Amino acid sequence: MTVFILVSGVFTGPHVWADVAARLTAAGAEVRAVSLSGLGGPRPPAGTGIDLETHIADVLAVIDSVGRTAGQEIVLVGHDYGIHPVVGAADRRAGTVARIVYLDSGLPQDGVPALASVADQGLREEVLRAAGGRGEGAGAELPPPARDAWQLWGSTAGVPDAALDRLTALASPQPLDTLLQPLRLTGAAATLPMAGILCSGNGASIAMVQARADFGEPTLRALVDPRVTFFELPTGHWPMLSSPAALAVTLLKAVAGEGRRLTPVDDAARVQPFLLEVPELPRERSGTIDLYVPPAARGPRPALVFVHGGPVPREARPTPRDWPVLTGYARYAAGHGVVGVTLDHRLHAVTDYEQAAADLADAVERVRADPRVDADRVALWFFSGSGPLTADWMGKTPPWLRCLAANYPVMAPLPNWGRLDSRFHPAEAVAHAGSLPIVLVRAGLEEASVAATVEGFLTAAHACGADIEVIDVPNGHHSFETADRTEESSEAVRRAMRTVLRRLTA
């Protein structure tokens, strides 16, 4: 017998699990949907606050009421904020809990409050303002969102109108201390089997988790373990409302140990050479930029600056400017007579675009000031998550910027990023690009959420008559230069470089 203990997220109570619970029960499982204090559950006596420890105690009470009998497995399922009291309770009952399921949630860490997992900077600031800047809630509450504001807390894709109406009507204020109190863990539950259910309609995917583990992010490297499995659901952040049948089936599969496992991080594979032969030119390092200067260059040469994607963990080693794919592009460009440039910028989280933009602008000015560079002939080439940075250069194009290129870019905030400053919305900026040539290299097997941002950008670009050329890699994945080392990929790189160099040197 499996006992599912279901814990919902911010503002919500047990009612959100009704359809899923019925399906799990019909499959022979026992289901307990937890009523968290203040969120559908009882409120404590007057003068007693509700914090994260209160909610951990709520989950513990349900675990203890179930007990542990022979052949019975307790599975904790945490959605959104709910994963924090789930992990806290599992840490205290590691010998009783059989498995933890992370349902489109973050990965809680010891000493870190739940607020840290909220991607939307505006929502974070709203919580801190409500707490009076004290870092504690002092019994205060955050009002639930209006019907059209739920998407700020996670994509509502697929949620029927009636379900969204009910979600709004039954929502409860969130006690601030549940978001502000740091989670305290002993590590007792670290070895429990776990499953992650990611909602691709909310911008999450197994491929993205794999990529960040490959970057060397310590908290995610722990997920490269045979006891950890993953699933994807093609829906938004509220699968219990949008896809209850599929979610119930997935939960049953998770209990059975099914699902995909991450590939062990292979540092040797991560530093495999560029897919094309390039000249072994030395780098010249200056601060955060590296220059690859054409051999026997005479007079100032045009420069091509390659802008890495992200977010990239602070701990990632090597840093992006030393990644073989970027050094390969830079050396390839230098072999064609232009100065190739790589750099490190500080895009470590989706809240860092302003800092990354400043780093890039500073790096470009330092490149233009180099006497070996023709300051009037510079092109920028962006990759992946640096796509939002293109908006600065399209919105107000300097005369020396001769071309802008982007490989498999993210051209709008993904649903689980929350709001991103309008400054970083390329689809809005492209209307001001004028005659700036734009080259976009599109991966045919791109993640659906990323592909949607590219299509939205292209629609806007075509509507305003932008000078844009699309180079398709039909059988290519995101980061096709390393993921798909094929002749199709190689030809796409050659064609893109020819196009950019033609624009840069014209």
Image (tube, rainbow, N blue to C red):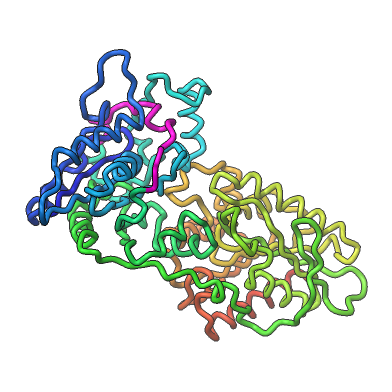
Decide whether residue 250 is among the magenta residues. no
Residue beneath the point at 70% across and 49% down: 396
Outermost residue on the top side: it is 46
Is residue 420 or residue 9 the one in the foreground? 9
Please tell me how many numbered marks the rendered image carries: 0
Residue beneath the point at 58% across and 51% down: 348
Residue beneath the point at 38% across and 44% down: 154
| Residue 334 position within the rendered picture, expressed as x and y whole percent measured from the top left | 77, 75
Is residue 346 or residue 396 the one in the foreground? 346
The quadrant of the rendering that contains the C terminus is bottom right
> In screen coordinates, is 433 left or right of 208?
right
Write down the region rendered in magenta: 165-187
Evaluate whether residue 326 shows in this view: yes
Is residue 11 or residue 270 the one in the foreground? 270
Q: Quadrant of residue 324?
A: bottom right
Residue beneath the point at 65% across and 49% down: 356
The quadrant of the rendering that contains the N terminus is bottom left
| Residue 380 position within the rendered picture, expressed as x and y whole percent measured from the top left | 70, 62
| Residue 137 position within the rendered picture, expressed as x and y whole percent measured from the top left | 43, 23
Q: In which quarter of the image is residue 58?
A: top left
Q: In this view, does 357 lie above or below 316?
A: above
> In screen coordinates, is 125 left or right of 31?
right
Decide whether residue 183 is among the magenta residues. yes
| Residue 213 position within the rendered picture, expressed as x and y whole percent measured from the top left | 48, 62
Evaluate whether residue 145 shows in this view: no
Is residue 409 or residue 467 the one in the foreground? 409
Q: Is residue 294 above or below residue 251?
A: below
